[in-house]
Amino acid sequence: MKNIALWGIPLFLLLQLTGNAADKPKPSPNGIEFPAGYQNWKLISMSHRVDNNTVRVILGNDTAIKASRSGKTNPWPDGSILGKIVWKQAAAVDWKKAIVPGKFVHAEFMFKNSKKYAKTVGWGWARWKGLDQKPYGKDDKVASECIACHTPVKKNDWVFTKPAVLPKP
Amino acid sequence: MKNIALWGIPLFLLLQLTGNAADKPKPSPNGIEFPAGYQNWKLISMSHRVDNNTVRVILGNDTAIKASRSGKTNPWPDGSILGKIVWKQAAAVDWKKAIVPGKFVHAEFMFKNSKKYAKTVGWGWARWKGLDQKPYGKDDKVASECIACHTPVKKNDWVFTKPAVLPKP
């Protein structure tokens, strides 16, 4: 009994650690870590893609928001992270002519670091799918698909989003 | 010259104060003060109204976000403020099949206080129009127009917005 009591506390701590590790989404196959807490980032813009019936909100970390709110986004400064949250579109229950977020699809991110990510046009690219936030892609070439799609906005530092106009605070 | 020098500093301060007062949006005609800094609130949801060609992002103050993220929104707790930012819809320049925020229309707010606003269904209602943020409405009856439109969602504590599904942080 004395042995069990002695081992009880470390075992409890080990279970706690294992539990936390399981809850945290795994890194992207290219090594990019999940940006925990993005749900609390501030607003940059939104969009409704009528070609694939999804709606999106684009948020930014503090570095990105400082750039976004001061119009200094070409290029975005190193340290900026842009997050795009994507849902299937749905009809609002109480206002039939409104389209609102339905099922959560994924959250995808661009991490600006012109040196660290020089080989992928100055950005790190990663996506986590579904509410269980599974990393997207099979290997470290995951960025090539992102960059191919973003090539039309190369002139805009590879970013589709233009910050929505907001009144000055 | 000595008199001018003596008055110089108070005059400068007076001009500064006048300048700041002019910059701050005036209260709503029903007395509700402008919720400064709402641009930095966190995300609740978004919508696209196809009946009037506007797009919207719905943000909340900290009390509202705590309720939103824990599903405790019927009723919303006292102290919640919901902000709806409205833009005319526009076609994205670099992705023709995407609709994005165009011209800024207005920001409108619901302030929950079941006692203070008991006469207007437990919420204070106010809207500020345009980038110069002019208060909407002619007199203190401004809420009656809001409440008439929100009557279909009386059962939802008078709120159209259902928080968008987000992964747990």
Image (cartoon, coloured by chain):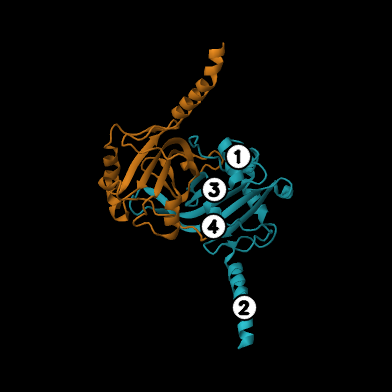
Chain colours: A cyan, B orange
Dot 4 corresponds to which residue? A106
Q: Which comes sooner in the sequence, label 2 or label 3?
A: 2
- Name above or below for residue B3 compared with residue A115: above
**Is disc 2 on the same chain as disc 1?**
yes
Classify 10 Å Cα crowding around label 1: few (below 14), some (14-19), many (20 and above): some
Inspect the image, locate mark 3, and give the three-letter code of the amino acid beneath it: Leu
The location of residue A160, given as percent across then percent down, is 58, 43
Q: Specify the farthest residue to the top.
A: B1
Dot 3 corresponds to which residue? A59
Q: Which comes sooner in the sequence, label 3 or label 1?
A: 3
Alpha carbons under labels 1 and 2: distance apart: 47 Å
Inspect the image, locate mark 4, and give the three-letter code of the amino acid beneath it: His
Q: Which mark is residue A11?
A: 2
Classify 10 Å Cα crowding around label 4: few (below 14), some (14-19), many (20 and above): many
Q: Which comes sooner in the sequence, label 1 or label 2?
A: 2
The location of residue A164, given as percent across then percent down, is 51, 39
Q: Which comes sooner in the sequence, label 3 or label 4?
A: 3
- Name above or below for residue A39 compared with residue B34: below
- Name above or below for residue B133 compared with residue B167: above
Alpha carbons under labels 4 and 2: distance apart: 35 Å
Does residue B84 appear to the left or right of B98 in the view shown? left
Q: Which comes sooner in the sequence, label 4 or label 2?
A: 2
